[in-house]
C-alpha cells in the first residue's frame, strides 16, 4: 500500500496480488474512504510475453499537485484523468489516437 497527500486529503494506492487488481482510493485525514478514484489491472507478472518475458507491463500511476489528482493507466492508452480533491473528474487528457504505436 502507498499513501500520499493530496491537499487536505490522502490518496491510498492498494494492490491485491491474487486478483491482480490495483485500486486508488481517496481518503480523509482520519483514513476513512471517501471514494474510489480508479480500479485497474496490476500487471506485475513479467512472465508470459512472446519470448516468455513481458518487457512492457501495464502501469497505473497517481500523482497530485495544484489541488488536483492525476491518474493514468497505460492499459487504457495514453490517457490521464484529472480529478478534484473530492474525487470528481475535472477533465481527461487522451492522446491515445495521436500517438503512434512503437514496435518492441
Image (cartoon, grey):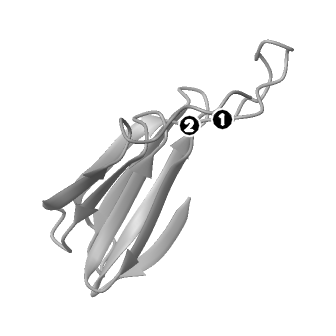
Give the mark nearest the N terminus, 1 or 2: 2
Q: Quadrant of the N terminus?
A: bottom right
Q: How many marks?
A: 2
Residue 5 vs 33, above or below: the answer is below
**Residue 32 vs residue 77, the one in the foreground:** 77
User: Are there few (<14), some (14-19), or many (20+) residues within 10 Å of tag 2?
Assistant: many
The foreground one among 88 and 18 is: 88
Helix, strand or loop for disc 1: loop
Q: Report the residue at 47% width, 76% height from top.
A: 4
Q: Is residue 66 left or right of residue 4?
A: left
Label 2 sits on a secondary structure element that is loop
Rendering quarter of residue 96: top left
Query: In this rendering, is residue 74 above or below 50?
Result: below
Say which of 80 and 32 sits in front: 80
The reply to whether callout 1 and callout 2 are in contact (CB within 8 Å) is no
Give the percent coordinates (x, y) of residue 86.
Answer: 15, 70
Q: Which residue is mark 2?
A: 42
Nearer the observer: mark 1 or 2; the answer is 1
Q: Position of residue 91 (x, y in %)?
A: 17, 59
Q: Position of residue 43 (x, y in %)?
A: 61, 33
x 27%, y 87%: residue: 8
Residue 55, percent from left and from top: 77, 33
Q: Which mark is residue 14?
A: none
Instruction: Give residue 57's mark.
Output: 1
Q: Is residue 14 above or below residue 52?
A: below
Q: Quadrant of residue 48?
A: top right
The C terminus appears in which quarter of the rendering?
top right
Estimate how packed mark 1 is, as few (under 14), some (14 to 19) or many (20 or more) residues with alpha carbons within 10 Å.
Answer: some
Q: Residue at x 43, y 37 (%)?
A: 77
Give the residue at x 61% y 35%: 17
Amino acid at each position: 500500500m502507498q499513501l500520499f497527500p493530496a491537499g487536505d486529503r490522502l490518496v491510498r494506492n492498494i494492490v491485491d496480488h491474487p486478483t491482480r487488481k490495483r485500486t486508488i482510493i481517496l481518503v480523509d485525514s482520519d483514513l476513512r474512504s471517501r471514494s474510489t478514484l480508479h480500479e485497474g489491472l496490476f500487471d506485475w507478472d513479467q512472465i508470459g510475453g512472446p519470448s516468455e518475458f513481458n518487457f512492457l507491463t501495464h502501469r497505473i500511476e497517481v500523482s497530485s499537485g495544484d489541488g488536483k489528482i492525476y491518474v493514468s493507466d497505460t492499459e487504457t492508452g495514453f490517457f490521464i484523468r484529472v480529478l478534484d480533491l473530492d474525487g470528481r473528474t475535472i477533465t481527461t487528457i487522451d492522446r491515445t489516437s495521436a500517438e503512434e504505436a512503437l514496435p518492441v
